[in-house]
Image (cartoon, rainbow, N blue to C red):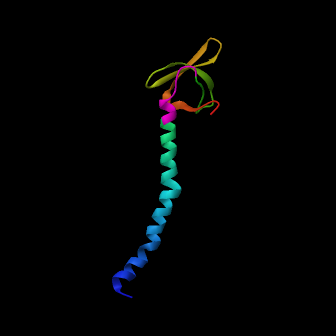
């Protein structure tokens, strides 16, 4: 076997390892980040949401950085927009 081909064959396990890591770790994480970004961009007044801290409420006001949630009668709390974990019912 030629020397150049022998060296290339020795690197296949490393190349294969990086390919597996890409498909198992990086790609799903990137997809999840895109879904979260879309969720935060599509928030609107009236959505029922859950925060990362577990607070449930309805959006009453929204701006680029903050969201105000009505969590009880006459009780509103302002959260950072990034604190929204999910929209209820999705």
Q: Quadrant of residue 2?
A: bottom left
Q: Quadrant of residue 7?
A: bottom left
Relative height, residue 3 to residue 83 (above, below): below
Q: Residue at x 53, y 31 (%)?
A: 83
- Residue at the limit of the structure toward the top, as seen here: 74
Relative height, residue 84 to residue 1 (above, below): above
Q: Position of residue 22 (x, y in %)?
A: 47, 58
Q: Position of residue 24 (x, y in %)?
A: 53, 57
Report the magenta residues as a range. 38-46
Q: Residue at x 50, y 48 (%)?
A: 29
Q: Residue at x 47, y 30 (%)?
A: 41
Q: Quadrant of residue 65?
A: top left
- Residue at the limit of the structure toward the left, as seen here: 4
Q: Position of residue 26 (x, y in %)?
A: 48, 53
Quadrant where the N terminus sits is bottom left
- Residue at the limit of the structure toward the bottom, as seen here: 1
Q: How many marks?
A: 0
Residue nearer the viewer, 78 or 14: 14
Relative height, residue 90 to residue 24 (above, below): above
Q: Report whether 5 appears left or right of 66.
A: left
Quadrant where the C terminus sits is top right
């Amino acid at each position: 076997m030629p020397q150049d081909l022998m060296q290339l064959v020795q690197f296949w396990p490393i190349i294969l390892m990086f390919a597996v890591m890409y498909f198992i770790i990086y790609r799903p994480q990137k997809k999840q980040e895109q879904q979260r970004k879309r969720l935060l961009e599509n928030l609107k007044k009236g959505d029922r949401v859950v925060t990362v801290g577990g607070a449930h409420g309805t959006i009453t006001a929204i701006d680029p950085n903050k969201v105000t949630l009505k969590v009880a009668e006459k009780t509103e709390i302002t959260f950072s927009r990034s604190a929204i974990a999910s929209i209820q019912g999705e």
